[in-house]
Image (cartoon, grey):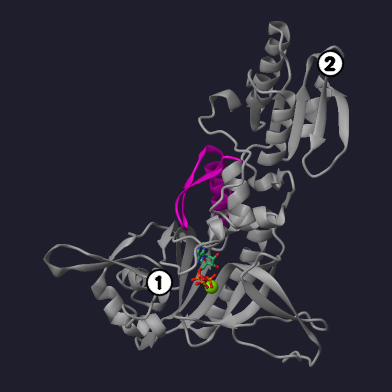
Amino acid sequence: MRQSKLFTKTAKETPKDEVSINAQLLIRAGFIDKLMAGVYTYLPLGLRSLEKIKKIVREEMNQLGGQEILMPALTPKEIWEVTGRWDKIDVAFKLDGDGGKQYSLGSTHEEVVTPLVKKFVKSYKDLPVAVYQIQDKFRNEPRAKSGLLRGREFSMKDLYSFHKDEEDFSDFYEKSKQAYLNIFEKCGLNAVIAEADGGVFTDKYSHEFQVFTENGEDIIFSCETCGLHRNSEIVKEEKCPQCGGGMVKNKAIEVGNIFPLETRFSDAFGFSYLDKDGKEQPVLMGCYGIGPSRVMGSIVEVNHDEKGIIWPESVAPYSVHLVSLCKESADIKKADELYETLTKQGVEVLYDDREGATAGQKFADSDLVGLPKRVVISPKTLAEDSVEIKERSSDKVEIIKIKELNSRLF
Ligand code: ATP
Ligand code: MG
């Protein structure tokens, strides 16, 4: 992508109405734009990162056996009355339609997915089933001051699993934990599993995936001896409930959450199956949420410095920032050629070919945008058939021959 063609621009000033680091940096670097509190547009660079995160999520969900679907975000009041959640979910956005009809914008989808899967699953032979979607969720969050960490419209991957017995459910639930850990690792996040309350989903426990950072909204107690983590919403202990060791507390961001739903929703919708003996049995369910947009915000919270973002390779919008300081047409031609060659070879390159910008502005923008590698091409380096290469996460600058570049980018 030629930066001269990018319709967005970077900004020097920190947006006054944003207090979170992720929103400040993502807006300044031209990744997102704020429409109102908790609601953002993804600009070309931001959308590329978000899509890369979703791709990682998809791969792991498919690997787990999940089948992708897309459910409606506009849902009728009646389905929420079946489970008694119309008045229980206090963050639900509700709408009035014609003829006294009422709707809710999907804040979660158990009420849609349970009757959906019920239509197709009749016998033990049809189980297990796991379906997921990646869709925008709507929640009227009272405090939406944390940029992508707490949106009122935000991206969520929600998977729902259906099982014939506890053993089959537990097996899947444990596998989902590993899939989640894989996702966060691939996104460059160090997440731990914490025990937590089940909220409006279940009376039972749930498991959260937490990333420790000073800007997190959650407080996690961790045992210094056995490594148990618990969300402070349910526990205020000084001693570890598992081994009696001392507990320390730290702030963290919840990036994922998985819940055993047991028969809470299948009972409400009368969803049962026929076992081997033709006897009716209740279907056991689980739900598994992850927020790609919150993951994107979290990545920025933990990977930045005073100059800007430091993207992990896997989720960076482009992997190389090719910065041209060339002014003469013969040099510009060489820079253009390098851009085209690399792009043809499959390297994802953002090419700073802007003519009006100074070297200082280009370097500052490159640090702000934070692509993993910066390659500078200038009259000085070209005189020796070379370029300058530097990783965003390091201060080391190297001069290498252009023909050696390939071996450094793959
Ligand atoms: P929180 O306690 O932070 O409000 P939650 O427990 O209500 O979140 P879940 O219903 O468990 O959230 O949603 C599953 C996942 O969706 C979360 O782990 C998080 O990654 C993401 N998520 C939830 N709410 C938001 C939000 N308002 N903005 C961005 N992502 C969100
Ligand atoms: Mg949660």
Label 2 element class: helix
Q: Position of residue 68 (x, y in %)?
A: 44, 57
Let me know if residue 317 is in the magenta part: no
Kindly indicate the quadrant of the structure image that contains residue 87.
Answer: bottom left
Residue 2 visible to the viewer: no
Q: Residue at x 69, y 72 (%)?
A: 251
> Which residue is label 1 attached to?
91
Q: Is residue 145 left or right of residue 402?
A: left
Query: Can you name the residue that lies furthest to the front here?
Result: 16
- Where does the N terminus fall, quadrant-wise? top right
Q: Is residue 132 left or right of residue 373?
A: left
Which of 287 and 154 lies nearest the eye of the viewer? Answer: 154
Residue 6 visible to the viewer: yes
Query: Can you name the residue that lies furthest to the left here?
Result: 99
Q: Residues within 10 Å of mark 2 (few under 14, many from 20)?
A: few
> Which residue is label 2 attached to?
380
Q: Tell me where the magenta segment starts and ends, as one range.
A: 29-57
The amino acid type found where label 1 is placed reads: Val
For disc 1, does the CB lie below 8 Å from ligand 1? Answer: yes
Q: Is residue 237 left or right of residue 47?
A: right
Let me know if residue 50 is in the magenta part: yes
Q: Residue at x 68, y 7 (%)?
A: 329
Q: Residues within 10 Å of mark 1 (few under 14, many from 20)?
A: some
Q: Is residue 84 above or below residue 156?
A: below
Q: Is residue 183 left or right of residue 399?
A: left
Q: Position of residue 55 (x, y in %)?
A: 56, 50
Q: Is residue 376 above or below residue 302?
A: above
Sequence-first disc among 1 and 2: 1
The amino acid type found where label 2 is placed reads: Lys
Q: CA distance from mark 1 to mark 2?
A: 58 Å
Which of 72 and 240 lies nearest the eye of the viewer? Answer: 240
- Where does the C terminus fall, quadrant-wise? top right
